[in-house]
Image: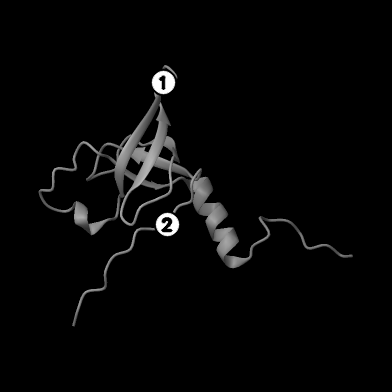
Amino acid sequence: MTTPKWEMPQPNVGDIVLFSKDLHHFTDPVVGFVAAEPGETTISILTFSPTGYALVHNSCHHKDDPALNGDHGWEDLGVWDFAPSTKTIRDLTDTGGTSGRKPSNK
């Protein structure tokens, strides 16, 4: 029996994500934006420093990517996950939700 291949969740350019330099525990995440067309296993993330400088983090793996286990030299790249607001929007879009609005009586 073969293990199914892990697939990165596919964000869209401009999606709000959380970025962390901590590959193992995802501590101290900061808000970022998907800066370019996502690759097959990584994305580029635009963040801003507390002083307002724009930073682009390239080749960021999703925090749940099993390829992060082991010695691979990716410690400086950082990891990402969808921001809670992006997860909510994706869930509503996937299920045909109405974002809490009551249906029209017309």
Quadrant housing residue 92? bottom right
Image spot of residue 22 (x, y percent): 25, 39
**Residue at x 66% of width, y 55% of height:** 99
Image spot of residue 83 (x, y percent): 46, 45
**Residue at x 27% of width, y 56% of height:** 65
From this viewpoint, which residue is outermost toward the top?
A: 51
Secondary structure of residue under mark 2: loop
Look at label 2 and name its amino acid: Gln
Q: CA distance from mark 1 to mark 2?
A: 27 Å
Disc 2 residue crowd, few under 14, some 14–19, many 20+, Cα 10 Å: some
Image spot of residue 105 (x, y percent): 87, 65
- Looking at the image, residue 95 lies above or below residue 63: below
Quick one: quadrant of the C terminus?
bottom right
The residue pinned by badge 1 equals 53
Secondary structure of residue under mark 1: loop
Left or right: residue 39 versus residue 75 is right
**Residue at x 53% of width, y 46% of height:** 85
Q: Earlier in the sequence, mark 1 or mark 2?
A: 2
The residue pinned by badge 2 equals 10
Quick one: quadrant of the N terminus?
bottom left
- Looking at the image, residue 45 lies above or below residue 63: above
